[in-house]
Image: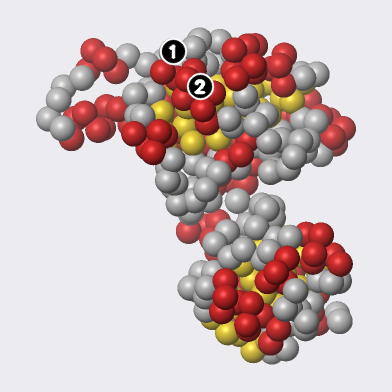
Amino acid sequence: MKILISDKLEDDGIKIFEANGFEVVKKFTITKEELKNEIGDYDGIVIRSRTKLTADVLENAKNLKAIGRAGVGLDNVDINKATEMNIKVLNTPEAPAVSVAEFALGLMLTLARKISYADRTTHEAQWKKNECLGYTLNGKKLGLVGFGNIAKHLAKIAIVMGMEVGVYSRFSKGQVAIDEAIEIGCSIYPSVEDLLKEAQVVSLHLPSSPQTENIINEERIKLMRKDAIIINTARGNLIDNKALLNALKNKNIAGAALDVFREEPLNDQELIKYDENLVLTPHIASQSIENQTAAAIMVAEKISNFLKSK
């Protein structure tokens, strides 16, 4: 059986495929048109976020039995088309929990202590000590919108740091998530609105779906505290960017940090040019050596086990 690796994958994962007797083809820069022409030659494909397995691509995947996503999100895979063609879709939601949670915490600290601003201005030979008065996270309320693996790990870290943690979890794992949140020491909120009214730090941990599109919009931002900050390491379409920028410019909220965007690479000039209380990073929350290795191993094991059972 042949496996196509269409995005960069750590060697640890590739070695697992080879040890299981699969023929591995590595094409980390394959284009959409090239993929359309070649995908029919493979029994399995492994992707990250670059490769887009849209319906017109999958239409040509006549021999494909499994798609492996080394990561969490599946918004770059047409799940309906894959299901229609009886193609198994597997991902690795367990892998990035620690890396993304730590990165979200880093963004919180960056905003709360004005680290990005301090770094930039110091490099410009300015001494902005008096302008860099921040605040501690200890004693503040962290609001988690969604409570999957990443949010759960972030909650544990935040509680150890002395933060209060509130959770709204309608879209993640339902009652299971709520029970886990209570056990950890979080308080549960019945609506996003109730959580946003109280939280000083809001961190988003939701998948991309019609239900979650613009869950942070103009009306909900108006409910937030003026000293609140928003962290998004989940998906770009969770936030109405126009409403966010207006709130930042008018000081209706204190700041925001975004690691994910509606279109990547980021080309929204309004976001790019505004940097007063906005931190932007290029979708790197899961870019740790440990996570890349774990995701590669997990996806290779899952795909190998599935294909060997066929």
Label 1 packing within 10 angstroms: few (<14), some (14-19), many (20+): few
Instruction: Look at 49% across and 36% down and name the residue there.
Output: 258
The foreground one among 159 and 73 is 73
Instruction: Look at 80% across and 18% down and name the residue there.
Output: 190
Label 2 packing within 10 angstroms: few (<14), some (14-19), many (20+): many
Q: In the rendered image, is residue 130 in sight?
A: yes
Q: Amino acid at mark 1?
A: Lys
Q: In the rendered image, is residue 284 in sight?
A: no
From the viewer's perspective, is 253 left or right of 48?
A: left
Above or below: residue 290 compared with residue 7: above
From the viewer's perspective, is 264 left or right of 1?
A: left
The secondary element bearing badge 1 is classed as loop
**Image spot of residue 5 (x, y percent):** 59, 76
Instruction: Look at 29% across and 18% down and name the residue there.
Output: 132
Instruction: Look at 57% across and 75% down and name the residue there.
Output: 33
The foreground one among 183 and 246 is 246
Quarter residue 161 falls in = top right
The secondary element bearing badge 2 is classed as strand
Q: How is the image coloured?
A: secondary structure
**Image spot of residue 235 (x, y percent):** 60, 42
Q: Which residue is mark 1?
A: 251
Above or below: residue 45 compared with residue 137: below
Quarter residue 186 falls in = top right
Q: Quadrant of the C terminus?
A: bottom right
Q: Amino acid at mark 2?
A: Ile
Q: Which residue is mark 2?
A: 229
**Image spot of residue 270 (x, y percent):** 40, 33
Q: Nearer the viewer, mark 2 or mark 1?
A: 1
